[in-house]
Image (cartoon, coloured by chain):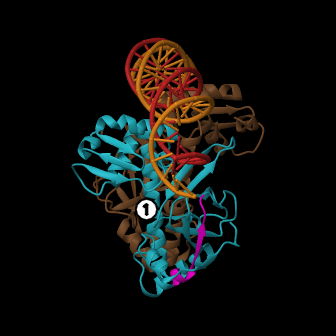
Chain colours: A cyan, B brown, C red, D orange
Amino acid sequence: MDMLDKSHKASLRERNLLTKTSFLKDLTGPSLARVLDAATVFSFPARTTIFQEGEPALAFYSVLAGYVRIYRVSRDGRQADIRICGPGDIFAECLIYGGDAYRFSAQAAENVSLARFDMQDIRQAANDDIAVARSVITALSQHLLSTMDCVVNDRLHTAPQRVADYLINRCPIETGQASIRLPFQKNLLAGMLGLAPEALSRAFSTLRRAGVTVRGRVIQISDIDALRRF
Amino acid sequence: MDMLDKSHKASLRERNLLTKTSFLKDLTGPSLARVLDAATVFSFPARTTIFQEGEPALAFYSVLAGYVRIYRVSRDGRQADIRICGPGDIFAECLIYGGDAYRFSAQAAENVSLARFDMQDIRQAANDDIAVARSVITALSQHLLSTMDCVVNDRLHTAPQRVADYLINRCPIETGQASIRLPFQKNLLAGMLGLAPEALSRAFSTLRRAGVTVRGRVIQISDIDALRRF
DNA sequence: CGAGGATTTGAGGGTCATCAAGGCGGGTGG
DNA sequence: CCACCCGCCTTGATGACCCTCAAATCCTCG
């Protein structure tokens, strides 16, 4: 990571954003202040590499705006996404006590704004303050649960089923028709679901018979229950 | 789970086993004693269901002997393994602060002996004692890292590559020839790698050309480096 | 309005799941 | 110690699913 990038302590607005993330939402008072004080805010243009597998793991991050791709590169150069992190997500937190080097790479999928937490600072904070430790535990737990879900989805469901799953989980309402706007490019969604972009496209066209219409980033669903039965 | 099963407080031998697990290995003194005192030891015959998805998550477990299958069942009845836990592994620890109900099912793959930890006891211990909280954090971190590895392996490698990977990681030595004895049935290995049993078998026969010979549970590798290049 | 990139569509091939037999291994009883 | 037997494992055939490459089309942003 280029330390010459513009960076600054978290502003009031940014502190408010961070306070609402699932990582920090249960913290209050001095515990919260201490973590917020440790945050440095960075902005990166699209496609910037934030860190690479193998580099010393000095910090973890919370996404303030934009999306970050977490991925690994195989020996023959192919890439596989592990996770897509959006606003409120944290990544590389598993290395607070988990190891010395990053185990995967992270890249800005678009222009992003990130809060950077020094590993040692947070490690120390968790040591001094049980509330911080508890926040780390809940963040790790949720991340682990969602990663296990990811494994099962890959192994149990076909591409159209995974896409249907994603759409249903993003639907604000329970029943009837809905309209969703994807928060990012289809490229990213494909990686998130473990698919090639073409496979995602074909999955959408398979879902047409279940009442799904795609126009750019906007997706119309005529009947959520019909989609659920898929 | 049937509470009428024979159960008892951990014996000295069992406490020693638990102390060596990666979950507890960094604990000492009263912190260690408190966690060990909270453990209850159970034995289950092969194929026993330990808990099922949706049940209230009252406890998590550490494997003392045997293997446990963690899996989920899809609506149409198919099962997918998420993880295979052997001696020293813990499972369902992600629910200490992570939720009220199990998110997957657990079944004894063979005769097993488990240490059961009441969620509330450990939650309380972690609250009172930063060392316990730190142990929970490192356990969660390692589990998360290995689950992310699992996602990437599924997405990046073919069946023979995943099998080769498994063999290489189980090899005690670095180079030359080796002989491995699988610690469990091939059935389990297949599930662990996200494969049907037939696919595992075919993967082994593909690896024959890389110097891998299979006879029952014993696997001969003529040249580890050749396998690594696969 | 136009350019460049993202997405869709088509064709072909590789990988893996499923179903159905047949072979082998390991544990049991003589 | 050896033969038998049950169940795990292997093998074959088939098809579904998804990746890759290539070309056409659609968005989006300047």
Q: Is residue A18 magenta?
A: no
Rendered-image quadrant of the C terminus of chain A: top left
Where is residue B220 shown, x and y percent of the image? 68, 32
The answer to whether residue C13 is left or right of residue B3 is right
Q: Secondary structure at mark 1?
A: helix
Q: Which residue is mark 1?
A: A142
D9 over B84 or under it: above or below = above
The answer to whether residue B51 is left or right of residue A225 is right
A182 over B9 or under it: above or below = above
Chain of the residue that carries numbered disc 1 in the rendered image: A
Q: Is residue A35 magenta?
A: yes
The one nearer the camera, C19 or C13, is: C13
Mark 1 Cα within 10 Å, few/some/many (few <14, many 20+)?
A: some
The one nearer the camera, A56 or A161, is: A161
Q: Which residue is found at the position 40% from the left and 43% from the top?
A: A162
Residue type indicated by callout 1: Gln
Give the farthest residue toward the left.
A176
Where is residue A77 shown, x and y percent of the image? 68, 43
Q: Is residue A189 visible?
A: yes
Give the farthest residue toward the right.
B176
The answer to whether residue D10 is left or right of residue A27 is right
Where is residue B157 shown, x and y percent of the image? 59, 39
Q: In which quadrant of the rendered view does residue A108 lie? A: bottom right
Q: Is residue A97 visible?
A: no
Rendered-image quadrant of the N terminus of chain A: bottom right
Where is residue C8 shown, x and y percent of the image? 45, 36
Q: In which quadrant of the rendered view does residue A156 lie? A: top left
The one nearer the camera, A48 or A94, is: A48
Q: Which residue is found at the position 59% from the left and 41% from the top?
A: B156
User: Which region shows up in magenta?
Assistant: A34-46
